[in-house]
Image: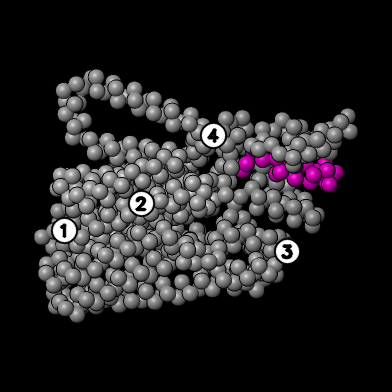
Amino acid sequence: MPDFFCIFAYENNAEMKKSISILLSIFVVLLPFGRYAFDGILIKQEVILCSCFLLSAILLAYTVFLTVNKKRISVSISILDISVLLFFIYSVLHLLFVKHLQVNETVIYKWFAVLYLYALCRIAQHRNMLMYSIVLSGVIQSVIAVLQKLYVIDSYNIFFDVTGTFNNPGRLGGYVAIAFTVAVFLLNAAIKNKSYPEILFLSISALFLSVSVILSDSRAAFVGVLCGVLVYFYPKLCLVYNRHKIIFSTVCFMLAILAVVFLFNYRQGSANSRLLIWRVSLDMILDKPLFGHGITSFDQKYMHYQAAYFDENPDSKFIPVADNIAYVYNEFIHITVETGIAGLALLLVVFYFAFSGKRQQLQKAALVVLLVFSMFSYPTEIFPLLILFPVIIGCFKTKPFRKIRLRRGIFVITGSVLAFAVYVNVKSELYFRNASSEIMQIRKNSRQPEEYICKYYKRLKYNHEFCRIYILWISEDISRNEIFNVLELFPTSESYCIFGERYAEKGMYGKAEECFKTAASMTPNRILPNYSLFKLYQKSGNRENAILIANRILNQHIKIDNTQTIRIRFEVENYLKSTK
C-alpha cells in the first residue's frame, strides 16, 4: 500500500483523490495572482486567510466523505509524516509558552495553511499533476516577466523592470528557478517515454523559464538552478569521482571558490548587507541558543541587536550597508533565531527523511533548489514560495511506518474541529477585509484615524503600514502608554526619530535624546538621527555635545548623498566655525 497521510485502501476514494489533485494544482497555479483578488494594504494577510480557508474546506470535505462512506478507515503514516507533525507540534508549543512575545495571528493561519496543504498533498492521487502545476505557474510568471522586459506591461516595483506578479525580481527568480528545475526533470522523463506532446510543452516551458531566471538577475536563483542541475547529473558525477577522485575533487573545489568569489563581487554591497545580518543574528542565537527568542521575534528584536553591534563596533566595515532590516536572508538562521537549535534540528530531520528515499530525483532536485534559495533569501515570508515546501515534500514517496485502523468517531471529531477552524477562518477574513477597506478610506479622505485605530489596533499592530499610521497618530500625544510597545513592534530608525521629534517639541529632552541615539546606532550611515540629536543639543543649550555631534556628522560615512545631506553638512560646518 502506498504511504499517504490518509486512507488509500479503497478504490472508491480514487475520484475524490483525483478531484483533490486537480483543486491543489489550480491552487498552485493561481496563488501568485492572489493579490489581484483584494484591495487595500492588507492584501498579504487576506491572501493567507483565504488560502487557509480553501485548504481547510477541502480537507473538511474529504473528512466528511470518509465519515459518510466508511465505518473503519485505514491510515498509513510514514516517518516523514511523523517528523513534519513533530516540528508543527514544537512550533505550536513554542507559541504557547513564549509569553513575552505577541504573535501576529496571520502567522498562525499561514502555518496551518502549510500543514493543511501537506496533508492534502499526501492524500492526492496524481502527484505528478502537482509538479506540472509548478511548471505551468512558473511559465505564466515567465511570460509576464518577458512582457515586462519589453515594456508591454508594467512591473510591480518602480525600481525594477522585471518582477512577474511579485514585487521584487529576487522572489521571481526563486519561483521560476524551482519551476525550471522541475521542467527539466519532467522533460527528461517525457523523452524516455517518447511522449511528444509533453516534450513540446516542457521544451517551450524550459526555454521561457531559463529566460526569466536570467531576467530576474537573482544570484540565489542562479545558485539554486546550478545545484538542481548537479542533482540531475549526480549519478554520472559519482562515476567520474570513483575513477578520478583527486582530479575531480580539485576541480570541484576550484570551481566552488571561483563561484563564491564571483557571486560575492557581483553585487558586493548586497553580499555585505547579508553578512551583517547574519553576523548580528549570530548574537541573537548566542543569547538564546536552545529554544530561540520566539516565533516572529526577529522583526521585534533584530534592530536593537544591530544597534548594540554598532555601539560595540563603531569602526565596523559593515556600517556602509546598515539599513532597517525585516528579513534574515537565510531561513536556517531565521529558524534558529526564533525557535533555537531544537527547532532547527527538528526541521533538519524533516529534510533528512525527505531525502532518505531512493530515486525520486525530481522531488529531491526541486527541494534542493528551494533550500539553496532559502540560504540567501526569505521564502517563508513569500506565501507563493512558502507553499512549495509542503507541495514538494508532500509529493515524496516514503515507506509507511505504521498502519492504523480508525473508527468513524475519530473522523467525526476531526471533521468537527475542521468545521470550527473554517468558521473562525471566515470570521477573521471578514474582519481583515473590513479593516483594509476602512484604512483605505482614511488614507483617501485624510481624516483622523482615532476611531479606526481604537477599533483595529489589537489585531493590526503587526502590520507595517498600520504601524506607520499609528505612530504618526500616537506621536501627537506622547503621553500615551502604548508608545514604547509600538516601538518594540516596529523598531526602525525612522520610528525612533519621529518620537524623538515629538519629545523634543514637548521639552522632554531626555527621552528625545534616547530616541535619537537609538536611531543613530541602528543605522549609523544615516545623517538624520545625528542631525536631529545635534539640533536637540542646540535647542537645550548643550554646546559641548552639539560640537561633538557636529564633528561626528562631518566625518560620518553616508549611505546616500543628496541635497539634504549636503545642506545639513553645510549648516553643521557653519555652526562649528561660529563656535571657534
Name the mark nearer the viewer: 2 or 4: 2
Give the label on residue 3, or none. Answer: 1
Give the label on residue 477, or none. Answer: 3
- Is residue 498 visible in the rendered image? The answer is yes
Q: Amino acid at mark 1?
A: Asp
Give the label on residue 139, or none. Answer: 2
Neighbor class of circle 4 (other Cα within 10 Å; few <14, some 14-19, many 20+) is some
The question of residue 328 being in magenta is answered with no
Of the residues under marks 2 and 4, which one precedes in the sequence?
2
Distance, label 1 to label 4, CA atoms, is 47 Å
Q: Is residue 217 above or below residue 77?
A: above
- Is residue 336 visible in the rendered image? The answer is no
Of the residues under marks 1 and 3, which one precedes in the sequence?
1
Distance, label 2 to label 4, CA atoms, is 31 Å
Q: How many marks?
A: 4
Q: State yes or no: discs 3 and 2 in contact (Cβ < 8 Å).
A: no
The residue range painted magenta reads: 522-542
